[in-house]
Image (cartoon, rainbow, N blue to C red):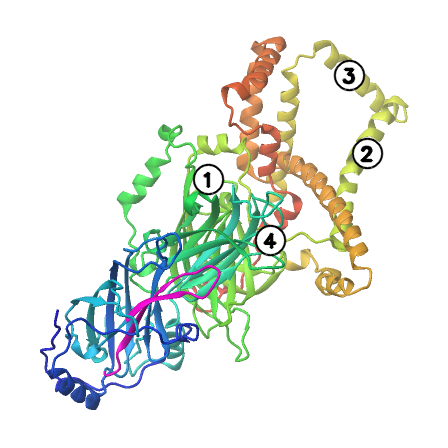
Amino acid sequence: MSVYTSWSYSSIQTTTSYDSLVDTQQTDSDEGNTDEGSLLDSDDPSVHSVSQQLSQSRSFFHINIHLKEGRDLVIRDSCGTSDPYVKFKIGNKVLYKSRTVFKNLNPKWDERFSIPVEDITKPINIKVFDYDRAWNDDPMGGVDLDITTLEVNKETDLKLLLTERGNSEYMGYLLLACSLVPKSQEPKEQGSKKSSLFRKSTRSTDSASTISKKIKMQLWNSVVNIVLVEGSNLVAMDDNGLSDPYVKFKLGTEKYRSKVKSKTLNPSWLEQFDLRLFDEQSSQLEISVYDHDTRGKDDFMGRAVIDLSKLEKEKTHTIVQPLEDGAGTVKLLLTISGTYGVEMASDLSNYTPNAINKDSIVNNYSLLNSFRNINDIGHLEVKVFRAHGLQAADFGGLSDPFCVLELVNDRVQTQTEYKTLNPEWSKVFTFHVRDIHSVLEITVYDEDRNKKIEFLGKVAIPLLKIRNGERRWYALKDRKIIHKTKGAILLEMDFIYNHVKAAIRTINPREEKLMLPESKFKISIMKQNINRVSQLIGVFMETGRFIQSCFDWQYPPRTIIAFIVYLVIVWNFELYMLPISLLLIFLKNLIVAQIVGSFRKEPVEDDYPADEEEDDDEEKDRQEEKKSIVDRYHAIQEICLQVQQGLDTVACLGERVKNTFNWSVPWLSSLAIIALSVGIIILYYIPLRYLLLAWGINKFTKKLRKPNAISNNELLDFLSRVPSDNELIQYRELRPDIPANTPSAKKKRS
């Protein structure tokens, strides 16, 4: 097949030099120069004159390439197949590398990408290799693509024979579709901020900060956040029937390696990391599992490929990915977020409130649909407008802030706004709510070019405290969500949910958050937990002393009244009176809360002074680890950590019971009152023996009726939704530092 060019070269416009590729240009040092080839039937005398004209013009181009498939490739593995992949090079720089198709001599890649070309007279060297786990990859032939044979702005189908220097055997061929696009003809004004690896701004009115932002945004267009959860039923590679597995992730040029888990076929990693997704690179996420070997080369255990282009963006996906050839599964949470551009659905410029859609959502969570899709409890919409007065994290007194939103295990983030302390993100995100007692955590970070991030501020908002449709500023807090830090964030939220589904979910086990901060033993926390438990013990001891004083006739009038009340209650006691007494406590505390609430002042940061000892805990831990008795220290620390966590569990349980009666969460207290009222009616009309029979039959037959059911205690599940005293402190709202030009600030000044 001959390929000719039929366009005029006199119209080519010379443009300025473009930025070199970042992170994708690498020297191909491991291949040698054993394979060369040529375009099929492209020997045309006109090519030489074309090359001379192009060499004089020196214009800049993109070559859009569609790598379709390979046919009849050579065998390189002992099993009679190969694991081919393709590299595209200009000179000694690799500009693109395809994914590997395993055990296939007729691979189908179906990958589209673009290659920048500065000198059109230099051919593109295309090489095919066989991936080898243990040794260097084996060459499978190559071909040189003469760019001057391509037509401008027209896609040309090519069939490229693979050859190898000094080898005349037939090595198969590649099927491609290529088009040559002059850079000067690219659209420059499309009303879009979408990042491009090779695009520059042509507006002369752009400010220096905007230009700096666009230069940075040329590097990546979105972030792939991955939580590696666990592996299941992996292959045994060691003599003991176990393995020491770890996982490698690869997305284009981005890579990550997990920690090694020793002697297990069902490892639990719980590692979170980010990979950047580029415009011009493959969207194939490659996953490889290896067995760590201290003496020899690590053994390959399995692999898988996930096509990210098929996943919905701005949504957390739970993926249980099977490895090839039945080598087990890997579970991970994956979110494609941090997208940039007004064409994205999450951008507020594309958001138009639709009354019909909102009515549909409201109807979906109405009482009539209470038993339809029982796990879909509610719908949360969060609009992230902007932040103000953030901390300066860079040397220039500015930051590169982005915002992360987390609802239990769902995680999305905004794009990064560069060189500013007052970023405007203008994003809208939606969440499917599985528990109305979840807490929306919004964290602002500063991005660094080396992938490290720096904490700038955080706010925690319980879903039940959201005021629908109210746009308001929230003060940012420190890492412990206790003390106020610099900056505030402007949000607007809408939360719609079904009350019946929420009530059913409340008495079932709570969803466990996978990524939690690592627990460390700290003397200050130990002291705090001891004080909390001491307060609970003090309440019981005070109650015991009160009852004993009645028996000892320390105050005769009190003892006489207590004796009469005791006789009346015992003589007339019925079981239904027990929940009535609890209802009286709720009623009394409700009246107290209403009276006290009207006089309660707005909390300020000084109500909870900072503990200076806590600020130095991490530094003390690092110093102590350097001591000569490290092992003994860690053993003692582990025991103390268990004691610390045990005290925290006891203290939290007591505080949750107290806060249930104190109406700290009115929805939960109301649910408790409804349950007690139903209990009163049941206990009044149904004898206790029948209730005990029903309870016993249910417990003994539950495993037979529902083999996969998770055993739980409904009362403890209910109490787990009630916040402890520490959580109430974290959820309190502090007075934000509102910008002077906002309506809220003007209203306060007036």
Residue 379 at what x, y percent from top left?
Answer: 40, 43
The residue singled out by tag 1 in the image is 434
Q: Quadrant of the N terminus?
A: bottom left
Q: Residue furthest bottom?
A: 56
The residue singled out by tag 4 in the image is 602
The residue singled out by tag 3 in the image is 566
Question: Mark 3 or 1 closer to N-term?
Answer: 1
10 Å crowding of disc 1: few (<14), some (14-19), many (20+): many
Q: Say which amino acid is labelled 2.
A: Glu
The residue singled out by tag 2 in the image is 542
Could you give the CA–CA distance between mark 4 and mark 2, rounded to whole angstroms? 31 Å
Could you give the CA–CA distance between mark 1 and mark 2, rounded to whole angstroms? 41 Å
Q: Magenta stretch? A: 121-142
Question: Mark 3 or 2 closer to N-term?
Answer: 2
Question: Mark 4 or 2 closer to N-term?
Answer: 2
Which residue is nearer to you in this view: 283 or 394? 283
Which residue is nearer to you in this view: 576 or 145? 145
Residue 706 at what x, y percent from top left?
Answer: 50, 23
Q: Say which amino acid is labelled 3.
A: Tyr
